[in-house]
Amino acid sequence: MRTGLSPIVSVEDVSVFFGSARAVDGVSLDVLPGEVLALVGESGSGKTTLIRAIQGLQSVSGGSIHHREKAEESKDLRSDSGVQMIFQDPTGALNPRQTVYDIVAEGLRIRREGTDEEKRVSDALARAGLRPPERFFPMYPHQISGGQRQRVVIAGAMVMNPVLLLADEPVASLDASIRGEILMLMRQLVDDTGLSILAVTHDLGLAWNIADRVAVMYLGRIVEIGTTEEILENPQHPYTRALLSVVPETRRMEQQILQGEIPDSKRIPAGCRFHPRCPLFRSGDLDETIAARCTTEDPHLTLGAGWHAACWAVDPQTK
Amino acid sequence: MTSIAMQRRRATAGRVWKQFRGSRQGMIGLTVLLIFVAMALAAPLIVDIRELNPVFARAAGNPQWAPPSEFGPLGTDHLRRSVWAQFVWGSRVSLFVGLAATVLTIFIGSVVGIVSGFVGGRLDAVMMRVTEWFLVIPFLPLAIVLASVLGRNVWNIIFVIGVTSWPSTARLVRAQVLTVKQRLFVDRSRSLGAGGFHLVGRHILPNVSGLILANATLAVPISILTETTLAFLGLGDPSSASWGKTLEEAFVNGAIVRNAWWYFLPAGLGILAVVLAFTLIGRTLEEIADPRLGQGR
Amino acid sequence: MMEADNNDRPMMGAEFILSVRDLNVTYQTTRGPVPAVRGVSFDLAAGDSLGLAGESGCGKSTIAAALLRLLPPGTTTTGEVTIDGKDLFSLSPGGLRAVRWTKEAIVFQGALHALNPVQTVGRQVCEPMLVHETESSQKAATEKGRNLFERVGLTADKLDYYPHQLSGGQRQRVLIAMALACDPDVLIADEPTTALDLMVQAQVLALIEELRRESALTLIFITHDLSVLAYVCERLAIMYAGRIVEEGRSSEVFDNPVHPYTRALAAAFPRIGDRSSRLAPSGLGGDPPTPGALPVGCPFHPRCPLAEDRCRDAEPGLRPAGPGRAAACVLV
């Protein structure tokens, strides 16, 4: 763990409400320099809303997002080229009427960092594995393959020399054989340039492949966080345990298929938000005092380094 | 990188032209249109403009109501003027008014459509209500009122056509802007820090320009027909002889009763040919801009 | 590849509920013919389950469409598909309609688009029963629909819902209920869980497994996610460029792949807890070939880490690679 380093981004008790729907409901999270942090959750967990808020594309209803090297709190990180984004669907993320060169140079032009534009574009493309870069300059998105398109998206982000890349399901729409190549590139960028990646995904294999730490989200809240090994090899929170047990790649655990689906974020259950579906709670094996807390008190994750879970039953530090 | 931009633009133009050339209807339209444009541009070389002047015609000793067999190539009218001269010079006015009014229509329509679609919210609601208001006003009465209030000259006619026919363009452009706006690349650009002008200029406009161009070619025939209608109703510019004006004079002076087909037929066929040519070109461009349209046929 | 196939299993067409022999499908496009499926053969007995895996463009979904004769007009199809002893390609339109639904049914991906948004799901489930006359009356059909919904884990009141009122997982369950409406022998599932979340995917997979055990349903499961197939299907066929390049028992193919392509595909889905893949994602260079322009020789050779000179010369057919297994690679 890279404790002692000041975080690149600190998310403090951030909430995003859409009317009565609490999409993100009090999330705190630090992204440390040079780490890949995987934010894992199912759809409806609020993970995409959270990274849109970090990117400044979504205004927050409460809490704050602090960015390193920036004293005052910023609600609009858009003005900050240090945070860049890569997307799930590279085909949609590229304007079909622009050439690869124009796409990669776009960030520089918006920021009017026009000096040695061609060299920076060329470097970014090469860094993203598109070599020789000049060959790709005049090409249009439809003339290159899906994997190459995702590399162009990555080059368009890397050209800004970001300290943090936000990746929204970066390989979910790519073919299996290409997926590994893109993940390799992402890990390599972190190891070579020391940037950080916050990757939102439902793919636990991705976390195992590239992440240093994993945070698990359920219904607008982070319920467990720790190193990849801690979370994926020895999960403690009952939700994480259930999630891992149904990953087809892990056949060592007994399957715990949860009934139903994530509840509507307009109707978040009282007490622990997971308790109506929680196998531990439903088993009836819980200590009575703990079970009583599950239905009445909302467990909060302890902040700070190391492993934590928001569960009355498994983490004594839960508040 | 301007050379790459130039190269790219040339490549796009080349691709569009290649596709266009492959379309028979497009090429027919283009050929017909080019003939008429050439005629309009070369009018002074083809016929002396004084032929349109009744005094000159009388002095030249032209016969009255002469069929083409007596006075070539298209006969004369009640004022002894050459119908051929009216046809050639009339193409000039009709094409000019048609094109100028279309430019105005498309300009207003595109600006309203893009602003409304891109900005959205309350502004969109207000602008769309105004657009709908213009759309439901019976077009011809409004044009007649405007034309008679503003006075009968070419520029007023252009203005009248322009301000009455933009709403459909605006709605079309707005719909397209709304779909483009939701594409991920707009989000990507926004996350790079792009502002509204950048987004519209770099992402929205390039992706709706094909539609706007196709819509423009389809708006020209409507403008020409509108001009003809207004002129036929006697609201045209009395000093410039458009095809519509020819039709009106032929009608008023009893060409139909006299069976003087040579008087009204050339102007009528000219309008038909030009309108058809623009429609064919517009259809073809529309298919190129939106490949899905072509498949259905 | 047919020869290798036949050596492996004796030809006894009558035993099999579904038998595919040397299936070739060629799409006709403006740019010329595009071969999507090239010489695919397999046999399925009642209760068998076969997983078809491969990347986009490998022809796996085309096979599904061919098995239901749902290919666009103008597509050239050769080979033989026998379903319950009937030759699929020589069926009359009426016979074909009876085969669709009553003999074989399909569950599509994208549960939202496969349902009519302006009809209740109950009506959409019951309609095929009346059309195919497997149920005599509206009342009987509704009763059957109620049972079906319970079988797929939906409460009967959901019959009156419109598609948009259901969640993605519930819609997928409706599609499965629709497919089961006429008691088919063969169920073709084309990426049925691709758009679903992990937990919902697990629910749907468990449902399919349960249905299969209950009623000896024959299953063809199509997906790009090898790990799902290894879990659901007994047999696995890996496709590349329109051909089956490896087949065998699914656990063997997944755990111990022979073909270099299968190896790359299996490694793309890391085993969590497996130290060798920790912080070491595994990929494959290059891109899948375009069906219209396949490389000469083995179509995989440009991306193959083990390619030799002879791979450029001829396309290898399926050859035996252990008991019940075959692979199309010269190194086998």
Image (spheres, coloured by chain):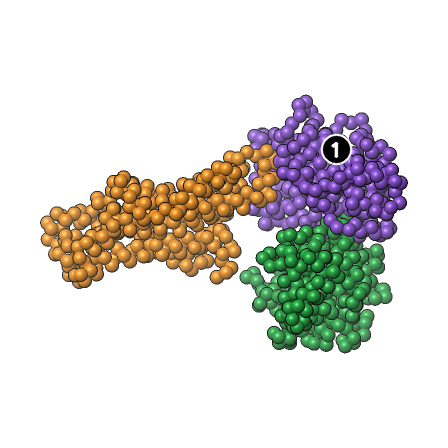
User: Looking at the picture, does residue B162 appear above or below residue A159?
Assistant: below
Q: Which chain is purple?
A: A
* Letter of the chain in green: C
Residue B263: image quadrant is: bottom left
Q: Position of residue A30 (x, y in %)?
A: 75, 31
Q: Nearer the viewer, residue B48 or A243?
A: A243
Q: Nearer the viewer, residue A80 or C57?
A: A80
Mark 1 closeness class: few <14, some 14–19, many ≥20 residues within 10 Å? some
Nearest to the observer: residue B150 or residue C117: C117
Secondary element under disc 1, as helix, strand or loop, is strand
- Residue at position x 35%, y 52% in the image: B221
Q: Which residue is mark 1?
A: A29
- Identify the residue at horizontal 80%, vertical 26% (top origin): A4
User: Which residue is at 55% across, 42% downward?
Assistant: B181
Q: Residue at x 48, y 44 (%)?
A: B174
Drawing shade for chain B: orange
Dividing the picture into quadrants, the one containing residue A128 is top right
Q: Chain of mark 1?
A: A
Above or below, A78 relative to C81: above
Give how far across and how far down residue B172 sits, in percent. Answer: 46, 47
The image position of residue A228, as x and y in percent, is 81, 40
Q: Amino acid at mark 1?
A: Leu
